[in-house]
Image (cartoon, rainbow, N blue to C red):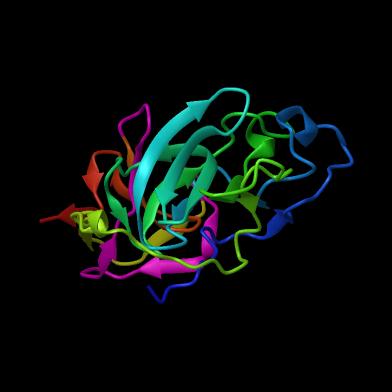
Amino acid sequence: MSETICAPVAAVVTQGFGNIPTWDPDFYARWGYPGHNGIDYGALDKTPVTGALSARLSKIGFEANGFGNFAVQDCGSFWLYYCHLDAVFAKVGDLVEQGRAFAYSGHSGACYPPGEAGAHLHFGKRVKTYAKTDPWKGWREPFVQEVITMPTEYKVPKMPKLPQGIVRVDGLVVRRKPGTTEQATGMKLSSGQTVQVIDSYKQANGDIWLCLGYLQWVAGLYQGKHYVAFE
């Protein structure tokens, strides 16, 4: 396998591996670690999270006082963890391809500060074989290269292609968040343009917003009118 681990989200790093936070120096010691056991990205709620490698999802779980909603990729000799997620729209057994969105970042679990203000993606790598005396208990800096050997059982069906829609109006404005008037760098779509939809969000009033990428939302159904059609 020739792939190398890539960043799983389009956001800046807010905390590196091994960091000891000033706001609570003993925070990671509660879990028995000498410091931060991964890399944090300052991703807003509902930011698309993509596969850092092409590998199968082996676990999707929840830890109320830890990782919150999390997903794990089995990469042969190690696992990749994606934590504090808002939602995962793949399932265990799916082959998540590198660069393919499969989840949304969020603020579930133990985030600081609590609530939406603490939204971020915790990205971690844990090797399967490590010494009992290892203070990190197998956690490693994610971008330090490991030997990647995929077992034969990785021959599983790939995730289905993301749905594509056709824009039905000219000048459809791309927003930063669903239901807002804040434009995404002035982006507008033309009638007849094909768009790939990562996820959707239905508001209480029935309006449906479609996510096209990082901070890129368009109205699919707005005030009863379809702005994007699907075959």
Q: Is residue 183 magenta?
A: yes
- Which residue sits at x=61%, y=65%? 143
| Residue 162 shows up from this direction | no
Question: Which of the 4 image quadrants contains residue 189?
Answer: bottom left
Task: Examine the image and state in which quarter residue 178 appears.
Answer: top left
Q: Is residue 192 left or right of residue 184?
A: left
Q: Quadrant of the C terminus?
A: bottom left
Judge by depth and name the residue closer to the eye, 100 or 218: 100
Eyeballing the image, is 113 above or below 131? above
> Farthest top residue?
64
Q: Residue at x 57, y 69 (%)?
A: 145
Question: Depth check: 61 or 30 in front?
Answer: 30
Instruction: Find residue 35 and report its horizontal and vertical position in percent.
Output: 78, 44
Give percent across and percent down for residue 151: 31, 58
Q: Position of residue 164 (x, y in %)?
A: 21, 60
User: 205 left or right of 39?
Assistant: left
Give the total of numbered labels.
Answer: 0
Q: For the view shown, which residue lies furthest in the front direction?
A: 132
Task: Name, please, the residue furthest toward the left.
Answer: 231
Where 11 falls versus 204 (above or below)? below
Magenta region includes residue 72: no
Residue 207, percent across and down? 32, 37
What are the residue bounds of the magenta stretch?
177-206
In this picture, is 221 found above or below 29?
below
